[in-house]
Image: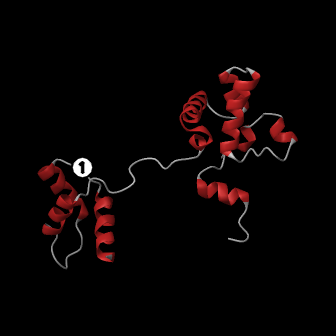
Amino acid sequence: MPNETKRDRLRQLGALNTRPEAVRAPWFRESSFFDPLDLVQVKYEMLRHVQKDGVNKADAAALFGLSRPTYYQAEAAFEREGIAGLLPRTRGPKSAHKLTDEVMQLIEQNQNAGAPLQARSLAQLLHSTLGISVHPRSIERAMARKKKR
């Protein structure tokens, strides 16, 4: 998008610091290079401040408006992956991993042709038959994906 701002892009990437006013490090106020909206930069500078300036971890987390657990998570991710470890990640499964071919076949066999999808009852059937717990909305999405093909 031609009129897209840095803030818009950070939001899209999940890297927008929702509490920029909590960043109290003076260099974030004194220089336009440091951006309190950029969560990756804030985390990196927090880690650098501890490493290079010898500041206490809890104090650094507070100075950058983050929690101690966030500090430790950022530290571990940075040690494991470098700066890329500070980038946001989507959480949870990446696909409908419970809805295997076997499960989808059972759903299709128990759906009445032409009748509205009864996802709640199909979820109960899956639980009683196969012992798996699937949210009714996951069944609805899987059936919609199947219709698109």
Q: Residue at x 29, y 55 (%)?
A: 135
Which quadrant is the C terminus positioned in?
bottom left
Image coordinates of residue 99 in percent, x first then y, are: 25, 57
Image coordinates of residue 37 in percent, x first then y, are: 72, 48
Which quadrant is the N terminus positioned in?
bottom right
All told, the count of numbered labels is 1
Going by the picture, which residue comes out furthest to the right? Answer: 30
Viewer-proximal residue among 101 and 52: 52
Q: Disc 1 marks which residue? A: 133
Viewer-proximal residue among 40 and 121: 40
- For label 1, the SS is loop
Q: How is the image coloured?
A: secondary structure
Q: Is residue 24 left or right of residue 18?
A: right
Q: Residue at x 32, y 60 (%)?
A: 137
Q: Amino acid at mark 1?
A: Ser
Check disc 1: other Cα within 10 Å, few if <14, some if 14-19, many if 20+: few
20 versus 108 height, above or below: above
Q: Is residue 129 left or right of residue 43?
A: left
Q: Residue at x 74, y 37 (%)?
A: 23
Q: Residue at x 75, y 41 (%)?
A: 21
91 versus 67 height, above or below: below
